[in-house]
Image (cartoon, coloured by chain):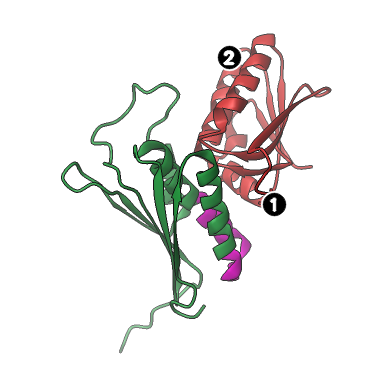
Chain colours: A green, B red
């Protein structure tokens, strides 16, 4: 991977069709970057969860997906315009709150969540997937 | 993910012997209710259930939740859930969920 050579971003708005487009966008970027199958699958699964949260649960039906290529891997950022829920939603029918979030943390090598608040809306999820296993040399 | 833009997101067809559903397309938080309804109708009629996911091209956390919920309901009736997998990304999702560790679930590969 050449650093920054494949950086890109796209906004998705709407419901079911937007979520599908966002998934296919990540799959296309992964293919273009020549990612190995398992790494590409994990990225698509993880980013899909972030996009599902943005499009379905943020209250704004919008997700901005940023694809960034680093020498050691891929970073995908998903930003919405919502407020991150300040409480558990155990009362909501048919939801096991946090399952999608948990799945993202399992799939990502590094995971960062910047919560949108009432004062500063906009939740950003950052998912990093390593494409090379780097052994850092310590200076003697 | 080989689906074309105009295709329906999810297509569900009943299967006979084994009795169940064949699910095509992409299963996510927007399409999962459609499958939940179809599964519920079969759960009401009793017996084991087979879900053929070999033509499913995507499965997210909400889909996994539905499979786990379905397995739990079947288990309370001493019935089995068989999941026929699946393409690599669906296989990966099922694998992370360790669905086959549930006592009444079998995951098979075509």
Same chain? Circles 2 and 1? yes
Image position of A49 (left or right of B17) = left
On the image, the x and y values in percent for residue B50 come to 72, 27
On the image, the x and y values in percent for residue B56 come to 68, 41
Q: Rounded to the nearest whole Å, what is the CA distance between mark 2 and mark 1?
A: 37 Å
Q: Residue at x 56, y 34 (%)?
A: B63
The region drawn magenta spans: A30-45
Whether the residues at callouts 2 and 1 have beta carbons within 8 Å, the answer is no
Residue under numbered circle 2: B76
Give the quadrant of residue B43.
Answer: top right
**Mark 1 belongs to which subunit?**
B
* Residue A38 magenta-highlighted: yes
* Residue B9 magenta-highlighted: no
Q: Nearer the viewer, residue A22 or B92?
A: A22
Element type at mark 1: loop
- Check the picture and name the quadrant holding the C terminus of chain B: top right
Q: Nearer the viewer, residue A140 or A98?
A: A98
Give the quadrant of residue B101.
Answer: top right
Image position of A28 (left or right of B110) = left
On the image, the x and y values in percent for residue B25 come to 67, 40
* Badge number at residue B2: 1
A38 vs B30: above or below: below
Residue A101 visible from this viewpoint: no
Element type at mark 2: helix
Q: Residue at x 82, y 22 (%)?
A: B16
């Amino acid at each position: 991977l050449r650093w920054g050579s494949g950086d890109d971003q796209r906004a998705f708005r709407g419901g079911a069709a937007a979520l599908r487009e966002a998934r296919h966008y990540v799959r296309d970027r992964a293919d273009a970057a020549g990612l190995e199958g398992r790494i590409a699958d994990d990225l698509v699964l993880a980013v899909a969860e972030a996009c599902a949260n943005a499009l379905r649960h943020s209250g704004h039906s919008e997700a901005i997906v940023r694809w960034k290529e680093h020498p050691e891997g891929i970073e995908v950022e998903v930003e919405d315009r919502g407020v991150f829920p300040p409480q558990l939603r155990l009362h909501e029918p048919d939801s096991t709150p946090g399952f999608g979030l948990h799945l993202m943390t399992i799939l990502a090598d590094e995971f960062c969540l910047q919560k949108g608040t009432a004062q500063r809306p906009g939740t950003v999820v950052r998912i990093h997937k390593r494409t090379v296993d780097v052994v850092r040399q310590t200076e003697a | 993910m080989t689906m074309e833009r105009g295709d329906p997101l999810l297509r569900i067809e009943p299967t006979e012997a084994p009795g169940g559903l064949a699910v095509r397309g992409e299963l996510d938080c927007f399409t999962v209710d459609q499958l939940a309804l179809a599964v519920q109708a079969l759960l009401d009629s009793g017996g084991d259930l087979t879900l053929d996911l070999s033509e499913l091209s995507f499965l997210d956390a909400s889909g996994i939740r539905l499979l786990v919920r379905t397995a739990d309901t079947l288990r309370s009736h001493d019935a089995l859930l068989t999941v026929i997998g699946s393409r690599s990304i669906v296989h990966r999702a099922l694998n992370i969920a360790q669905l086959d560790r549930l006592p009444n679930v079998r995951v098979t590969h075509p």
